[in-house]
C-alpha cells in the first residue's frame, strides 16, 4: 500500500513538472510565434488580438518588405551585415585564441597584472569609452566604414572570449604539448596541430556568441555608420519604421523573421559544439 502511494505521488509530481515545463516553454516561445503570425496579418489586426491565427491572411508582406525603402532593398542590408559580421567573427576567434594561448601557457613579466587588467575591462561599461572611441575612429577617418568593428577584432579586444579560452586551455593536459615538443614542434605548431583541434567546441561557442551579438547589434552601427547604403539589418529595420508615415507592421514582422534566420541556422547547426564548449569550459582537469 505504501509503495503504491509512493508511486502515485511520483506520477503526480512528474505530471506537475511536465505541465510547468510545457507552460513555461509556451510562455517563452509565444513572442516569437506572435511575430511570425503577425507577418501574415493586416495592420489593423496585429495589435487588436493576441491570437496567433490571422482572420485574413496577408501573403505579400515578405515580398513587399524585401523591397525595403527607397533605392535599397532588405537584401542590401543583409549583405552589409554579412560583410561586417564575418570578418569580425573570424578575426575575433583568431586573435582571442592567440592571446589566450599566451596567458594560459607562457610565463612573461607582468603576466598577472596584465591578465587582471584584461579581466577588469569586462566590468567597464561600453558607454564609458564611447566618446574616446568615437574621437579616435573619427581622427583615423574610419567613421561610416566597417573598420571600427573589424580592426579592433584583430587585436583580441573582447576580454570575455579571452577569459573563456584561457579557462578551456588550462583544462587541457600539458603532457600533450610536452610530447609534441619532444617530437620537434614549436609553439606555433603546438597551437595549430594540438590545441586548436582540442579547443574546437570553445572556438565554435565563441564564434556563435560573436556572430549573434554583432548581427543583432544596433547601437554601435547607429554610432559609426551614417550612410544608408552601408546600413546593417538592425538599422534597416529601424529605418523602415521611421521612414514612412504609415508603418507596415506586417512587413516589419516579416523582415524581422528573415533577419533572425541566419542566427537560428548557425545556432542549431552548431548546437552540439556550443553545448559541449559551454559545459566543459573551466571544468576539465
Image (cartoon, grey):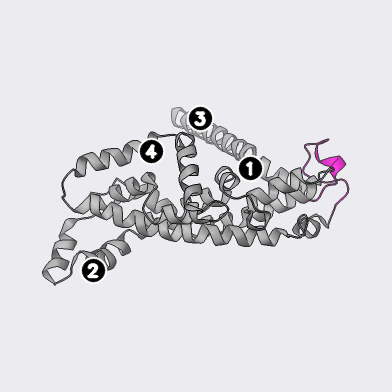
Which residue range is magenta in the image? 40-58
Residue 260 horizontal/vertical position (percent): 62, 52
User: Could you tell me how far apart the alpha carbons at marks 2 and 4 are, in whole angstroms?
Assistant: 31 Å
**Label 3 crowd (10 A; few <14 / some 14-19 / many >=20):** few
Q: Nearer the viewer, mark 2 or mark 4?
A: 4
Task: Using the image, determine if residue 23 lies above or below residue 100.
Answer: above
Residue mark closest to the camera, 3 vs 4: 4
Q: Secondary structure at mark 2?
A: helix
**Precedes in sequence: disc 2 or disc 1:** 1
Determine the CA span between mark 3 and mark 1. Answer: 30 Å
Element type where label 4 sits in the image: helix
Q: Is residue 180 left or right of residue 264?
A: left
Q: Which residue matches tag 4?
A: 122
Q: Residue 196: name its quadrant.
A: bottom left
Residue that carries the numbered disc 1 in the rendered image: 29
Q: Which mark is on residue 9?
A: 3
Nearest to viewer (mark 2 / mark 3) = 2
Q: Secondary structure at mark 1?
A: helix
Q: Which residue is mark 2?
A: 189
Q: Nearer the viewer, mark 2 or mark 1?
A: 2
User: Most prominent secondary structure in the magenta stretch?
Assistant: loop
Q: CA distance from mark 1 to mark 4?
A: 31 Å
Spatial CA distance of label 2 from label 1 is 46 Å
Mark 2 and mark 3 lie on one chain; the one further toward the N terminus is 3
Amino acid at each position: 500500500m505504501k509503495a503504491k502511494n509512493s508511486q502515485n505521488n511520483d506520477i503526480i509530481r512528474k505530471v506537475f513538472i511536465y505541465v510547468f515545463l510545457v507552460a513555461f516553454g509556451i510562455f517563452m516561445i509565444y513572442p516569437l510565434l506572435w511575430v511570425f503570425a503577425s507577418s501574415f496579418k493586416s495592420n489593423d489586426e496585429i495589435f487588436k488580438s493576441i491570437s496567433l491565427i490571422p482572420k485574413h491572411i496577408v501573403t505579400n508582406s515578405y515580398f513587399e518588405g524585401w523591397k525595403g525603402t527607397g533605392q535599397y532593398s532588405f537584401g542590401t542590408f543583409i549583405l552589409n551585415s554579412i560583410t561586417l559580421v564575418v570578418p569580425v567573427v573570424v578575426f575575433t576567434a583568431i586573435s582571442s585564441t592567440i592571446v589566450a594561448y599566451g596567458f594560459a601557457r607562457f610565463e612573461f613579466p607582468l603576466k598577472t597584472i596584465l591578465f587582471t587588467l584584461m579581466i577588469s575591462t569586462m566590468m567597464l561599461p561600453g558607454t564609458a569609452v564611447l566618446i574616446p572611441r568615437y574621437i579616435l575612429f573619427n581622427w583615423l577617418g574610419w567613421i561610416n566604414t566597417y573598420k571600427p568593428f573589424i580592426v579592433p577584432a584583430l587585436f583580441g579586444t573582447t576580454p570575455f572570449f579571452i577569459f573563456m579560452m584561457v579557462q578551456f586551455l588550462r583544462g587541457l593536459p600539458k603532457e600533450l604539448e610536452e610530447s609534441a615538443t619532444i617530437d620537434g614542434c614549436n609553439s606555433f605548431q603546438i597551437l595549430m596541430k594540438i590545441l586548436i583541434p582540442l579547443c574546437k567546441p570553445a572556438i565554435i561557442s565563441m564564434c556563435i556568441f560573436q556572430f549573434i551579438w554583432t548581427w543583432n547589434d544596433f547601437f554601435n552601427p547607429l554610432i559609426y555608420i551614417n550612410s544608408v547604403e552601408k546600413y546593417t539589418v538592425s538599422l534597416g529595420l529601424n529605418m523602415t519604421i521611421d521612414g514612412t508615415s504609415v508603418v507596415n507592421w506586417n512587413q516589419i514582422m516579416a523582415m524581422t523573421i528573415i533577419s533572425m534566420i541566419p542566427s537560428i541556422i548557425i545556432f542549431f547547426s552548431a548546437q552540439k559544439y556550443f553545448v559541449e564548449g559551454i559545459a566543459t569550459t573551466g571544468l576539465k582537469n
